Image: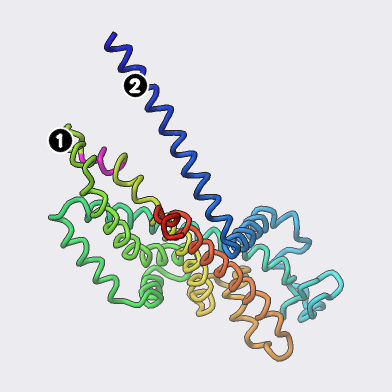
Amino acid sequence: MVSAEVVTNKEVSSSIKPKKKEKYLVTTVKRLLKNKLAVVGLIIIAFQVFLAIAAPVITTYDPVRQDLAASELPIFSEGHWLGTDNYGRDMWSRIVFGARISLLVGITAVSLGLIGGVALGLISGYYRKLDGIIMRIVDLLFAFPGILLAMLIIAVLGTSLVNVAIAISIWSIPTCARIVRGSVLTVKKQEYIQAMKSLGASDLRILVKHILPNCLAPIIVFATMRMATAILSTAALSYLGLGAQPPTPEWGAMIAQGQNFMWTSPHMTIVPGIAIMLIVFAFNVVGDGLRDALDPNMDLNQ
């Protein structure tokens, strides 16, 4: 009889948890969709993802193929609706394939930064003895301006998009670690965490199954807004010649190449500049929207 009651209680609790999670997810999505700027940002991001996936299908020309006979064609030219660059390469093709590069580098850099930052933040916030050591290392990384730290890392590793992703991920670790540590310090004081310790649960189980899930909201917001920083930093490093190398169709490298033709062919600089501006704007406003939507006190504030 007792075992039947235990099973019944387990079944009830297991059926309640998914419903709570589903309700929370639906509520969060509704809050996010109420933010008009966030919706615009989501549309822009979805469009860039579509460009990145369908790049070979929606383009007619090879993004690196030169055609000197058709160089520096203006916007809305026949067969080249965004014009061509000084080597006759189709700007639309280069912008579309550039979206793939920006997304790939951004996702890689943010993912690596999250792995390192979350791990350090969890350990630092949970183990007070290691907190001082880890945070001093983080403070040391904070002493360098972000772009300068990335340039230093690339100077050691060499110029390539892979090294750009590594440099941006290392630059992202300190900020992520600080955010996660602050959340851990708050969550680990909760009564249910103390109860888990009293029941003999291992530290790894407490960290992974109980503390980390309650720290996901700030991590998601950080990751979204860091995508904007990663894409902008990739463009900046490529503009300086430390990232993508010619003839790779990367937006920052395209701006660097087009700046010498600003007066004769301004579209070579303006088009990739608008692409960078839109996607950075999109990730920033979506990050702001997620921060509000994931705030448990949002309804109370309203």
Question: Which residue is identified by label 2?
Answer: 9
Tell me the quarter of the image containing the N terminus: top left
- Dot 1: few (<14), some (14–19), or many (≥20) neighbours within 10 Å? few
- Dot 2: few (<14), some (14–19), or many (≥20) neighbours within 10 Å? few
Could you tell me which secondary element the residue under label 1 belongs to?
A: helix
Distance, label 1 to label 2, CA atoms, is 22 Å
- Comparing 137 with 123, the one in front is 123
Residue type marked 2: Asn
- Comparing 245 with 122, the one in front is 122
Name the mark nearer the viewer: 1 or 2. Answer: 2
Q: Which residues are magenta?
A: 203-208
Residue type marked 1: Ser
* Labelled pair 1, 2 in contact (Cβ < 8 Å): no
Quadrant in which residue 156 is drawn: bottom left
Q: Which mark is residue 198?
A: 1
Q: Which mark is residue 262?
A: none
- Comparing 62 with 178, the one in front is 178
Measured from the top left, where is residue 110 in percent x and y?
44, 59
Is 124 positioned to the left or the right of 151 in the image? left
Q: Main secondary structure of the magenta part?
A: helix
Whether residue 64 is in magenta: the answer is no
Is 134 positioned to the left or the right of 245 in the image? left
Whether residue 204 is in magenta: the answer is yes
Measured from the top left, where is residue 86 in percent x and y?
72, 81
Q: Residue at x 38, y 74 (%)?
A: 146
Measured from the top left, where is residue 79 in percent x and y?
84, 69
Extreme residue toward the top, this view: 1
Q: Residue at x 32, y 60 (%)?
A: 179
Q: Residue at x 59, y 81 (%)?
A: 256
